[in-house]
Amino acid sequence: MNDRQIAVLSAIIEEYTRTGLPIGSKYLSDTYIHGVSPATIRHDMGVLEEEGFLYQPHVSSGRIPTDKGYRYFVESIMQNRELDRNEQLQMQKELLQLRAKNVRMARTTAKLLSALSGNVGVSGIIDREEFYEFGLRRLLEEKHDKDELCQLAEALDYIDEKIDVLLDGMKDGDTKIYIGDENPIHEISGYSMVVSPYKNKEGERGIVAVIGPKRMQYERNKSIVEFVKKYLGSLGVGMVFFSSGVYVIIF
């Protein structure tokens, strides 16, 4: 894949993530890849389709990414980044307040993961077989395939029975992205998942995950999952003080 084809694939994934609509060559030429003709971009799109990175839903439509295209994006294009400082402070503040209230962290963490990602958030303590999910309604509102949603809901109902399969070969602290059919839980094959196991200070093993459509924001969701698992796992509060309207937390 040459540099221009990488730019085409990256632009299609970015725009498809935003709109959910097939992307055409003229739009890419006008919006993303200036100075390159639509005909040249169409040729690159054709090459990418032949190699399995893109798919054309209809003869006259633009292209959308395939699972292979998303995998290439995640491994070779996507940048690993941390959440910006304001988001980190806000999340730390909310998690600290929840812990101070002695609420069920797994349940509220699932809600927080869903709110931040716009997808389904999953959180739990493996040793206690205590798991929570939140955000299925978001997928319903986006009119996802009903059969796939029912399969996802069923998988989440029995997530405690599928943890060993899900985390097979993963170490505490690892973060893995499953795309479509890569999912070890076959009921989730219509979606993508960002998942990470961790171990808390008491030695209990936990899990945090985000599940959503294959056109999810992989870079952001990975950042969210890694921040939350790091907070719940290896970090502890050393000192807390209030400054300029926010809680500042030093570990």
Image: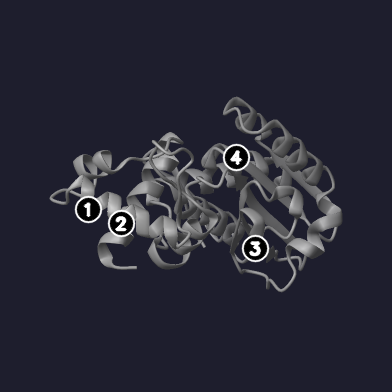
Please state the horizontal and vertical placement of residue 212, each as a whole percent of the image. 60, 44
| Mark 3 vs 4, N-terminal side | 4
- Badge 2 density bin: few <14, some 14–19, many ≥20, Cα 10 Å: many
Across the whole image, how many numbered discs are drawn on residues?
4
Q: Tell which tag, 1 or 4, sits nearer the viewer.
A: 1
The residue that mark 1 highlights is 40
Say above or below: 169 vs 100. Answer: below
- The residue tagged with tag 1: helix, strand or loop? helix
Image quadrant in which the N terminus is located:
bottom left
**Near-viewer residue (11 or 200):** 11
* Left or right of 226 in this view: 45: left
View extreme (left): residue: 35
Amino acid type assigned to the residue bearing label 3 in the image:
Gly
Q: CA distance from mark 4 to mark 2?
A: 36 Å
Residue visible at 70% across and 31% down?
146
Looking at numbered disc 4 in the image, what kind of residue is underneath it? Ser
Q: Which mark is residue 114?
A: 4
Residue 217 appears anywhere in the view: yes
Mark 1 and mark 2: Cα distance apart in space: 6 Å
Dots 1, 2 in contact, CB < 8 A = yes
Which mark is drawn over residue 27?
A: none
User: In the image, 204: left or right of 140?
Assistant: right
The disc label shown at residue 44, or none: 2
List the residue tagged with mark 3. 233
Distance of mark 2 from mark 3, alpha carbons? 44 Å
